[in-house]
Image: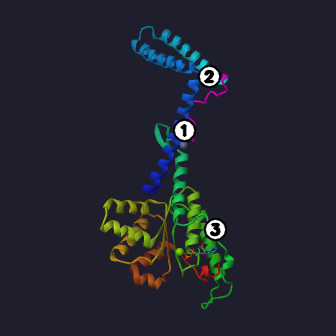
Amino acid sequence: MAYSKHIYDLATKKLSDRRASALSVADYRKNETYREIPRLSEIERELSSIGVSTAKAVLSGKDAATLLTSLKEKSVALQKEFNGLLLSHGYSVDYLEPQFSCDKCSDTGFIEFDNKTITCECYKKLLSDCACEELNTISPLSLSTFDSFKLALYSDKPDERGNIPYVRMQKIYDFCLKYATEFTPESKGILMKGDTGLGKTHLSLAIANEVIKKGYSVVYVSAPDILSKLEKEHFTYSYSQEQEIMQSLINCDLLILDDLGTEFATNFTKSAVYNIFNTRVNMGKPIIINTNYTSKELEENYTQRFVSRVMASCSVLSFIGTDIRSIL
Ligand SMILES: Nc1ncnc2c1ncn2[C@@H]1O[C@H](COP(=O)(O)OP(=O)(O)O)[C@@H](O)[C@H]1O
Ligand SMILES: [Mg+2]
Ligand SMILES: [Zn+2]
């Protein structure tokens, strides 16, 4: 799983905020409780001096065993007194412990397991939530779902080529639903083509929704936006920014490149499209490309080689019908 640096930064910030807030609540509680029950801070001091004596006893070596036993007994008694005081004042014994959102990693995001550091489930969840939120800022992801996709909006009368939009779109819908349900980072790509307003963005976001829910990383970008950004970074700003964007387009489990063909095409944007596409295909990673272009227009605007590689590595879905926005 690989998210963009931006998503990692967001998730890491949220996690460290959680931890900081748990620690500051604990700190506040300690101050208040110690003020109310002064004996608690004495016990704490005594316990820490026992800690120091224990270390000294271990280092001195002389009759350490007896000394250690008596120190241990003292410390157990003090701990008991401490807990007793908390209980008698109406607090639970863990009242002063930081209450982390995640018990497993104490909101650090990582767990030591088998001498290895592994990523905690809570951090994985946070990353996927952040990726989802990020998508939501671009397009209302919650609105573009399989549930809100209505087949009834497509005509059941044959078009001028004899194709029935309702039937075609039912197949496309079923295909996309199955694709999303069975998605793995080794899935094939999809090329969604067809006129504006036929539901390409809607269905690709519906796929994104499901794939994110399965815990995979999804990056959704509109071709004109991302290509102009890349071009700007390339020619005016830093190389590292451009590399960072490229990395997030290449590293994610699923890339959705929407509205290919509506960018202001230059040699730079074309080679960026080839680069993104070829790198992903070579790595066996899926990409969903949406375009209003016909196959012929794609060939005219990009290279024939690019188009035939797209056709070979992607399932092609040809959307038909009347602009949904004229019906809604
Ligand atoms: N079958 C559908 N059911 C419900 N809403 C739809 C459907 N198809 C498209 N829409 C809505 O119509 C608008 C245009 O669809 P969109 O997916 O952007 O089309 P495209 O990407 O093909 O241009 C969006 O608001 C979308 O949510
Ligand atoms: Mg669209
Ligand atoms: Zn955790």
Q: How much space separates mark 3 and mark 2, taking CA atoms?
A: 54 Å
- Residue drawn at x 53%, y 15% is 72
Residues in magenta?
88-105
- For disc 3, the neighbor class at 10 Å (few under 14, some 14 to 19, many from 20) is some
* First reached walking from the N terminus: tag 3 or tag 2: 2
Image side of residue 235 versus residue 196, left or right:
left
- Above-or-below relation of 140 to 26: below
Residue 166 bears which disc, if any? Answer: none
Q: Residue 258's spot in the image, x, y percent? A: 49, 72
Q: Amino acid at mark 3?
A: Phe
Quadrant of residue 284 within the rendered picture: bottom left
Q: Nearer the viewer, residue 41 or 131?
A: 41
Q: Main secondary structure of the magenta part?
A: loop
Q: Tell me whether circle 1 and circle 2 mark residues in contact (CB < 8 Å).
A: no
* Circle 3 residue: 146
Residue 316 forms part of the magenta stretch? no
* Circle 1 residue: 22
* Residue labelled 2 has its Cβ within 8 Å of some atom of ligand 3: no
- Above-or-below relation of 167 to 43: below
Which one is closest to the eye, mark 3 or mark 2?
A: 2
Quadrant of residue 80 within the rendered picture: top right
How many marks overall?
Answer: 3
Q: Nearer the viewer, residue 327 or 161?
A: 327
Q: Residue 171's spot in the image, x, y percent? A: 63, 76
Residue 94 forms part of the magenta stretch? yes
Q: Secondary structure at mark 1?
A: helix
Which one is closest to the eye, mark 1 or mark 3?
A: 1
* Circle 2 residue: 83
